[in-house]
Image (spheres, grey):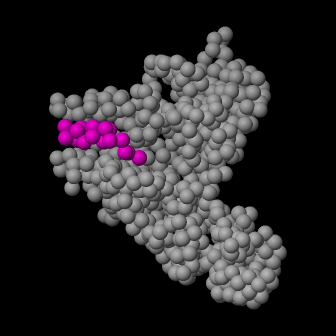
Amino acid sequence: MSATQALFLNREIGILEFNRRVLAQAEDTDTPLLERLRFLCIVSSNLDEFFEIRVAELKETIRINLSSAGRDGMTPGEVFTAVSRIAHEMVERQYRLLNENILPELAKAGVRFLRRNDLNEAQRVWVREYFFSEMMPVLTPIGLDPAHPFPRVFNKSLNFAVELEGRDAFGRDSRAAIVQAPRILPRMIRLPGGLQKAKEQCFVFLSSVLHEHATELFAGMSVRGCYQFRVTRNSDLFVDEEEVKNLRTALQGELPLRNLGAAVRLEVADNCTQAMADFLLQQTELSADDLYQVNGPVNLVRLMQIPALVNRPDLAFPEFRPGRPAALAKRADVFAAVRKADVLLHHPFQSFTPVVNFIQAAAKDPKVVAIKQTVYRIGTDSAIMEALIEAARRGKEVTVVVELMARFEEEANINWAGRLEEVGAHVVYGVVAHKTHAKMALVVRREDEKLRRYAHLGTGNYHTRTARLYTDFGLITYNQAVCADVNEVFKQLTGLGKAGTLNHLLQAPFTLHANIMAAIKNEARLAKAGKPSRIIAKMNALLEPTVIEALYAASQAGVRIDLVVRGVCALRPGVPGLSERIRVRSIVGRFLEHTRIFYFLNGGKENVYLSSADWMDRNFFRRVEVSFPVLDKKLKQRVIKEGLKPYLKDNRQAWDMSADGRYTRKNPRGTLPRSAQMTLLGELAQE
């Protein structure tokens, strides 16, 4: 093993390891049944993006013959071989779980997915009528011959390869055809109530309906086989930001091409003949390593709709009402409440509504003269964006930094940018070659003939839906020094000039990395001097090599280090002489862990930062990020008590990482079970 291999773990393998942990949630019989199905779908959704971005980049690296080893000591070819093996194993495990456990258990609970052979006569008649009335009018079978070449199927679309015999009306004897399922057709069709037993809810897959009636699309010919398939394509957009004159216009031109990028994966039904599979591989220019044959629907993500469709609370996580800070509950005036003391919000255990109310109140308040906000992921339906539009209509100075290059959110962000510009808001797209990932809002209000600022800073996006699904901290503050820092960052994003000195915020790409390195080295220095030292950091990913090397050095100096890293971690913990004082764990539970918290003991001062940034190269050097200190002593202790301690004690949803990159789930057997997320629900959410 080389020195490089000993220091760093591979990123792509680490991402797949995270998805193994998510899949374990689907396998856990303590998880409610519909939630197990949801976790299964999340794995498929994650794998889709993994292939669209990471595998696509890996294949392109191999194509242009870049064979040098990375920081982990692996060549691109070696990484692809490992990734392919792990991904095939994971997909096989997914479908086995679906067919042998989840679907049978759902059937026992009265939620049934009927295959063609399961239909009784009445159901068969209804399905046939459905095919002729709802499906056949929008289907366009394409016979493959010199006049009809293989179509360029869209990314992740549902398609069917049909094997035929015979001649058609023109005397053509094409042996194959492609049928593309329009996106307007539901992939799961609910049977009417009269066609199922009382208290049962039955569904039929679109693929089953088309299989049953494929012959109707090819009159007079014999259908020898009908096989569903799906192609995943490279979905990373490339826009040369330094060359284009208008980034929004350039992106609008690129977005349609995302569905037609180079193929990176082919999924087919497991009943597909080898000859047809080989034909599809040839047409998509893929190899056997890129083929995934599955026993079930080729797109499990579609099953994500089921929990909402069946409405079975008994099979889902219990509902909860997010709590609300007492300071905001007592005062209707959010500005008066924040002037009295900073407000810390811990989502989703506490409501995101105060953040929405903060922007809405600013939009309506005649004393507010300006609002500035960053937008990364916000969704297609946003009360915050509507409030900003309303504020602009009312004549306030509204400035919105919209990150158009937020992956898979480009179209929504383009649409919001257009609407904001229509009402006179100032819309800027950040800095060339640096995504704006910071989560900031600034409100300027005239009070007693002076302008005062209020700010919201967060670890997560201004997205009301994900705020109920992701764990994040947010801070609303009247601290004028912090607000001045926020204003300075907005000046950099909207104007030109040198970066100004900030009072409290750490900012990427300027000061964040250097300050994190200095804080780690300071703990090492204290440890060498025999003084107490401690580092605790919680984040989504840890990849940046110089930070990892600094953590290794701190461990060797005697610093005890706990890292709670939800996803990929390139650091090897517990290696004698290198990292034996470093523990790495991952928490995977009901909510997606998204909070970034950096804790340094610093001789007893306990420096605590909340951040929009993970410890990755891109966050430190290629994005605009902010980390903000928790200055109020009570709130600082709250962050430690709620954001760190429960996660270090968790023995229900915690996975401990070993030096080889593998994870072992904690087992509470013989001890009191502790789940950080359940603890926080009990402490912060309402009954």
Between 391 and 636, which is closer to the camera in this rendering?
A: 391
Q: Residue at x 50, y 79 (%)?
A: 100
Between 343 and 72, which is closer to the camera in this rendering?
A: 72
Q: In this view, does 515 lie above or below 448?
A: below
- Left-right relation of 561 to 371: left
- Tell me where residue 586 appears, x and y as whole percent: 39, 53
- Left-right relation of 255 to 270: right
- Tell me where residue 84 appears, x and y as whole percent: 42, 65
Which portion, as a residue range, is magenta?
Answer: 541-558
**The quadrant where residue 634 appears:** top left
Residue at the limit of the structure toward the front, as seen here: 146
Q: Which residue is drawn at 61% across and 60% down?
A: 155
**The quadrant where residue 330 appears:** top right
Q: Which residue is drawn at 77% across and 77% down?
A: 131
- Tell me where residue 174 appears, x and y as whole percent: 69, 81
Main SS, magenta region, reads helix
- Left-right relation of 199 to 298: right
Q: Is residue 75 above or below residue 230?
A: above
